[in-house]
Image: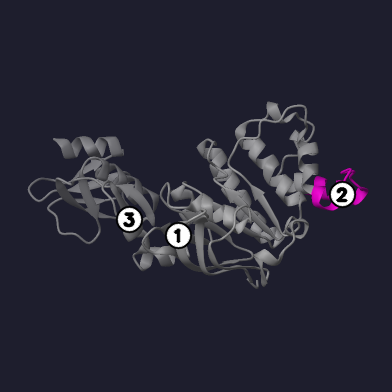
């Protein structure tokens, strides 16, 4: 599958214009966003994520540099033309009453319907296809104010799809959702990049989900600007560890995820693989015990002995013990 650089940022400075001076939020940003990819923007509060999204969406002017959108400078687009290229889903909850889901999705056709906004048969077909794409057919006749946050967010994404733009920007699309809904929305967006050939770029604070689902990650900070790459490449070259190098947070290279830093009081050699190994390691770390395959320690725990069920604890000065559960294992270690 060919991936095209849909958006190219060339020495971009973003911020706010003043009468006498400008407030620069981030500068000299050079990066590209590609089609058929879900790209997630990560960064701490106040670093400029929303400012960057507003600038890319042409909601506010750039301070310096260029934004190329489909090989054309952003400032060369007329407003009506831009509405057929970019659709935006904001983080604010839409408090709209007396409107059905289908009517909301139909508003995505406004760049094509003219002054009166009357939908043609083709427009209605596109609306129904968008509703089907995000799997909200049973909700189509529901009033918006009766929906859950997750259902409402799906409706907003369907509206963006009905707009038929090659680019979709989303600002914190999972901000108000419970965890299953967060996962569902992120998986939906990733699926849409594959099925619709769209370029989807979003800001998020859901770090773990972004690392597991996104094709590309943009790390944004005040010192280095934008650092981009696949989650795996950013992990291998140390960017993820450095980016979140703060008290209480550590990037775990073995799991590829972040974990809470513990002050370990002892070490244990842990062998095995798969989910049993991962769950025991997690429980031990929570109890201030560092566990890994390649360390030297008096106690050894086997998690995947093919001849026995449960977990085997080997001690230097007493017989081995079998634990039937992780809770049982922790009790042995505390004796």
From the viewer's perspective, is 4 left or right of 300?
Answer: right
Q: Quadrant of residue 318?
A: top left
Q: Earlier in the sequence, mark 2 or mark 1?
A: 1
Judging from the image, what secondary structure is the residue with disc 1 in? strand
Q: Are marks 3 and 2 in contact (CB under 8 Å)?
A: no
- Residue 189 location (% of width, % of height): 62, 52
Q: Residue at x 26, y 40 (%)?
A: 323
Q: Which residue is mark 1?
A: 26
From the viewer's perspective, is 106 left or right of 324?
Answer: right
Q: Are marks 2 and 1 in contact (CB under 8 Å)?
A: no
The crowd level at tag 2 (other Cα within 10 Å; few <14, some 14-19, many 20+) is some
Q: Looking at the magenta stretch, what is its main secondary structure?
A: helix
Answer above or below: position of 105 versus 43. Answer: above
Residues drawn in magenta? 109-129
Q: Is residue 181 magenta?
A: no
> Which numbered disc covers residue 252?
3
Judging from the image, what secondary structure is the residue with disc 2 in? helix
Residue positioned most to the front: 20
Q: Earlier in the sequence, mark 3 or mark 2?
A: 2
Single out the mark in the foreground, 3 or 2.
2
User: Tell me, what colour scheme is on the image?
Assistant: one colour
Q: Which residue is mark 2?
A: 113
């Amino acid at each position: 599958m060919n991936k095209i650089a849909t958006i190219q940022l060339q020495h971009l400075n973003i911020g706010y214009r003043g009468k006498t001076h400008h407030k620069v939020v981030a500068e000299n940003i050079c990066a590209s966003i590609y089609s058929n990819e879900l790209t997630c923007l990560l960064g701490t509060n106040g670093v400029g994520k929303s400012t960057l999204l507003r600038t890319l969406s042409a909601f506010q002017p750039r301070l310096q540099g260029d934004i190329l959108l489909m090989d054309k400078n952003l400032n060369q687009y007329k407003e009506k033309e831009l509405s057929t290229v970019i659709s935006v889903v904001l983080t604010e909850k839409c408090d709209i009453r007396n409107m059905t889901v289908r009517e909301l999705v139909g508003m995505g056709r406004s760049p094509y319907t003219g002054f009166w906004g009357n939908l043609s048969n083709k427009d209605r077909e596109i609306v129904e296809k968008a509703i089907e794409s995000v799997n909200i057919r049973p909700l189509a006749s529901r009033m918006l104010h009766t929906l859950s946050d997750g259902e409402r967010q799906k409706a907003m994404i369907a509206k963006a799809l009905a707009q038929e733009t090659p680019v979709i920007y989303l600002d914190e699309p999972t901000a108000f959702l419970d965890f299953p809904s967060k996962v569902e929305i992120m998986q939906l967006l990733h699926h849409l990049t594959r099925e619709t050939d769209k370029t989807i770029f979003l800001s998020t604070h859901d770090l773990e989900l972004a690392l597991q689902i996104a094709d590309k990650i943009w790390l944004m900070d005040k010192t280095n600007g934008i650092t981009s790459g696949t989650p795996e490449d950013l992990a291998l070259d140390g960017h993820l560890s450095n980016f979140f190098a703060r008290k209480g947070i550590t990037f775990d290279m073995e799991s590829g995820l972040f974990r809470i830093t513990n002050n370990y009081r002892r070490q244990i050699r842990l062998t095995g693989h798969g989910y049993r190994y991962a769950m025991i390691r997690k429980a031990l770390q929570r109890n201030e015990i560092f566990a890994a395959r390649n360390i030297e320690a008096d106690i050894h725990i086997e998690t995947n002995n093919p001849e026995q069920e449960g977990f085997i604890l080997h001690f230097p000065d007493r017989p081995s013990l079998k634990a039937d559960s992780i809770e049982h294992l922790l009790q042995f270690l505390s004796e």
